[in-house]
């Protein structure tokens, strides 16, 4: 499977490394274009490729791993998502000032959903830091928990299978309205919980 990655920062690289280890090819992209990604692709190895935002977004599963402020300009380049699965890893806050974006009373994923018309959105990978996600998910005799939520059961099943292939223990929190509030950072109860599922 070839997976698109919007972003090439610490979170994108951490997730890409696990996806590649799980047998997928990952097309990474950023605002500066494919040539700027040569060092990142070399670091990640043969399973990584550089592409444009449009190249990455054309894949059947696409991860969003870019700063919140870049979402409108990046996602606005894709007019329709044609039922593709989009995995939202973002949080509505970013350095250096860590000001929380005004979401108008909605969860961040509800805001993102409006930016990806026609996509099947799944929220995942937003409750842990890139440094924690980058670690081996198989730890202490178990598997690191990754929470996810969404409204499309097939999309969640495919994301759950990806998580398992990478060595994570996926925990389905239900629909987006319910799960996104639990996952929301800041405000939800689940961010920063680094849990290991034994067995």
Image: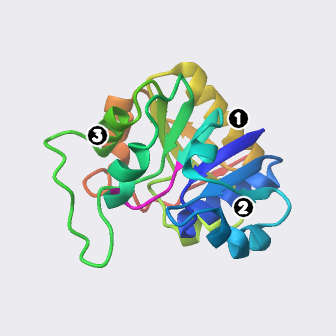
Q: Which residue is mark 3?
A: 111
Classify 98 as above or below 116. Answer: below
- Distance between mark 3 and mark 1 Cα atoms: 26 Å
The residue depicted at 75 percent of the width and 42 percent of the height is: 2
- Quarter-wise, where is residue 62 in the image? top right
> From what the image shows, is residue 126 above or below residue 151?
below
Residue 132, by quadrant, is bottom right
Q: Nearer the viewer, residue 161 or 70?
A: 70
SS majority, magenta: loop
| Element at label 2 | helix
Secondary structure under the numbered disc 1 in the rendered image = helix
Q: Is 193 positioned to the left or the right of 154 in the image?
A: left
Judged from the image, the secondary structure of the residue bearing numbered disc 3 is helix
Is residue 121 shown above or below 23? above
Contact (CB < 8 A) between labels 3 and 2?
no
| For marks 3 and 1 on the same chain, the one whose residue lies earlier in the sequence | 3
In this figure, which residue is indicated by the disc labeled 2? 17
Residue at which label 1 appears:
161
The region drawn magenta spans 64-68
């Amino acid at each position: 499977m070839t997976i698109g990655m919007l972003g090439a920062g610490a979170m994108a690289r951490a997730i890409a490394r696990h996806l590649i280890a799980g047998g997928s090819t990952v097309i990474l992209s950023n605002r500066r274009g494919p040539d700027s990604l040569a060092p990142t692709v070399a670091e990640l190895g043969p399973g990584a490729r550089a592409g444009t935002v449009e190249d990455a977004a054309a894949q059947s599963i696409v991860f969003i791993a870019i700063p919140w402020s870049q979402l409108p300009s990046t996602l606005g380049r894709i007019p329709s998502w044609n039922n593709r699965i989009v995995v939202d890893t973002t949080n509505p806050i970013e350095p250096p000032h860590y000001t929380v974006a005004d979401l108008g009373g909605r969860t961040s994923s509800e805001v993102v959903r409006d930016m990806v018309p026609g996509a099947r959105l799944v929220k995942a990978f937003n409750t842990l830091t890139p440094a924690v996600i980058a670690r081996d998910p198989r730890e202490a005799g178990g598997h690191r928990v990754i929470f996810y939520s969404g409204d499309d059961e097939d999309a969640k099943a495919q994301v759950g299978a990806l998580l398992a292939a990478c060595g994570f223990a996926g925990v389905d929190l239900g629909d987006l309205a319910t799960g996104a509030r639990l996952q929301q950072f800041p405000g939800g109860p689940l961010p920063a919980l680094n849990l290991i599922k034994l067995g």
